[in-house]
Image (cartoon, rainbow, N blue to C red):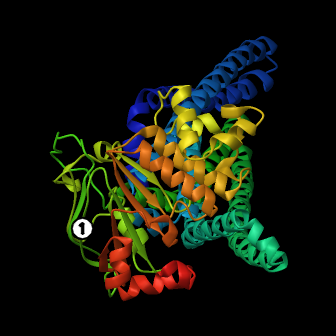
Amino acid sequence: MLWKLLVEYLRPHRKLLAAVVVFQLAQSIASLYLPTLNADIIDEGVAKGNIGYILSLGGVMLAITLLQIVCAVIAVYFAAKAAMGVGRDLRGAIFARVGEFSEQEVTKFGAPSLITRSTNDVQQVQQLVLMSATMLVTAPMLSIGGVIMAIRQDVQLSWLIAVAVPVLLIAVGLITARMVPLFRKMQKRIDTVNRVLREQLTGIRVVRAFVREDIETERFARANEDVTDTALRAGRLMALAFPLVMLVLNVSSAAVIWFGSFRIQDGSMQVGTLIAFLSYLIQILMSVMMATFMAVMIPRAAVSGDRIGEVLRTESSVRPPKNPLSSDVRRGELEMRDVGFAYPGADQPVLSGISFTAKAGQTTAIVGSTGSGKTTLVNLMPRLFDATSGSVRMDGVDVRELHPDLLWGHIGLVPQRPYLFSGTVRSNLLYGKPDATEDELWEALRIAQARDFVERMEEGLDAPISQGGTNVSGGQRQRLAIARALVKRPELYIFDDSFSSLDTGTDARLRQALKRSTAGATLVIIAQRVSSIVDADQILVLDGGRIVGRGTHSELLETSETYREIVSSQLAAEETV
């Protein structure tokens, strides 16, 4: 998978990579030419005392060295630019793919794992590209060129190269083979650390309220130790690779000097030639060492590439139609026809045989006990999930035949857990309608019963909101989320238990204001509190994933035992009567 990713995401940067190859080739040629010049200086200049020859050839070596430095700097610059571009493109691709995921795919991977894949895993691939362009490109040039130049210097000593290089490759190969499973395990354990840390940061109030700091600290320590142990095992193997390289390098150098001394003694080899041969051997083995370093990086990058590819290959279970209908949503009438839904691998469906119509200009309420399937039903309306049987229709058109953007553009959803983005009150409200005027924002806040507390904020609409809205109360956060949906002015409003954090007075005022401001729109309200839905035009009672009662409040009190149980558990006996 890593190879496919590199082929695809390096293609736009092929000009930069071509420039890297050209400058690395020039640098390698310069490096390979220097030992030959050095041998000439020793044999023709130093040995014969020819100072002029030493100075002139030394000047050539200095110029070649400067050229080598310039080429190396330029090559590294282009390599870094290509690597950073690949990292940027991969992060963008992962972000775009995750943005297409339905709730099902997000749940499958988990937020901590998706964060790790778009940061740490991308960084591993990015680092591999950089190192490959600076080291892996140079290594074969130096090794092949070094072998050719060494043989030109002395053929009889070249058998040392034929022994040293395979020994080094076999040793490094054995170490690398043991590192691959460790790197795979390490990436999974990094996911675990991210998950534990995310849970602790998100639930810090709960942790402190139940005095669980010590237990959570121990839990994080265990996850952290798992990563540390795996990293240490991989690090020990990695640390073993470089001493092996140096051992082979030093033994080979000693062997060259040992056997070369006999050839110098019998006059078949000059001192400069021996030094040049030794330089080429060192270059060859150093290039093998660079390849060794890359061999250490490749397994981890390969694991990261597989994890990135897994995200990019995963198709959303909610796909836009190939030929979406162009019909626009005008009334926002919602209809469900014999809808059923089951999670993948589940033995029993969550919803079965759901059929109802939420008409424009009316309020449809859905009530039921915990686990009855209310939230799953809500997720089917804006097509966060696709029904596994039956059909969900908007103005008579199956939502699977509409483009998701067109569908979502006509729905205002206030989720059960309202989420505010870091920014200001204004920036959060403008999520509903980017071009909304200030009067529209204040009007939405007034209807949502949020204008009073926003006006009391020092900066009003420009008051800061922290990530998740943690600097405002739960009720204020809920009202701001409602105002965000109201700014949009959609044809269909979906309130998923959106009044649970409000006191009864605010709840009543909000429902009255909503009734006046949303006239003509379709309202679907999911509620736990019966007092929030007593005025609904239609109430659906959900139990065990099925509709067990429908009608108005007064009708259901007479016909539905389940509804009477819900009411009696919430209201006093005289209110029920």
Q: Which residue is drawn at 43% across and 50% down?
A: 515
**Residue 276 vs residue 373, the one in the foreground:** 373
**Residue 532 vs residue 251, the one in the foreground:** 532
* Quarter that holds the N terminus: bottom left
Q: Is residue 541 left or right of residue 128?
A: left
- Give how far across and how far down residue 238 sits, in percent: 68, 64
- Give how far across and how far down residue 285 sits, in percent: 63, 50
Indicate whether 203 appears above or below 510: below
Mark yes or no: residue 155 visible: no
Image quadrant in which you'd find residue 111: bottom right
**Residue 250 vs residue 385, the one in the foreground:** 385
Q: In this view, does 543 lie to the left or right of 479?
A: left
- Give how far across and how far down residue 384 sits, in percent: 37, 59
Mark 1 lies on a secondary structure that is strand
- For disc 1, the marked residue is 356
Mark yes or no: residue 179 visible: yes
Q: Which residue is drawn at 16% across and 53% down?
A: 396
Crowdedness near tag 1: few (<14), some (14–19) or many (≥20) residues, C-alpha within 10 Å: some
Image quadrant in which you'd find residue 541: bottom left
- Give how far across and how far down residue 284 sits, in percent: 60, 46
Q: Residue at x 50, y 54 (%)?
A: 511
- Give the total number of marks visible in the rendering: 1
Q: Which amino acid does label 1 sit on?
A: Phe
Q: Is residue 239 left or right of residue 105?
A: right
**Residue 286 vs residue 568, the one in the foreground:** 568
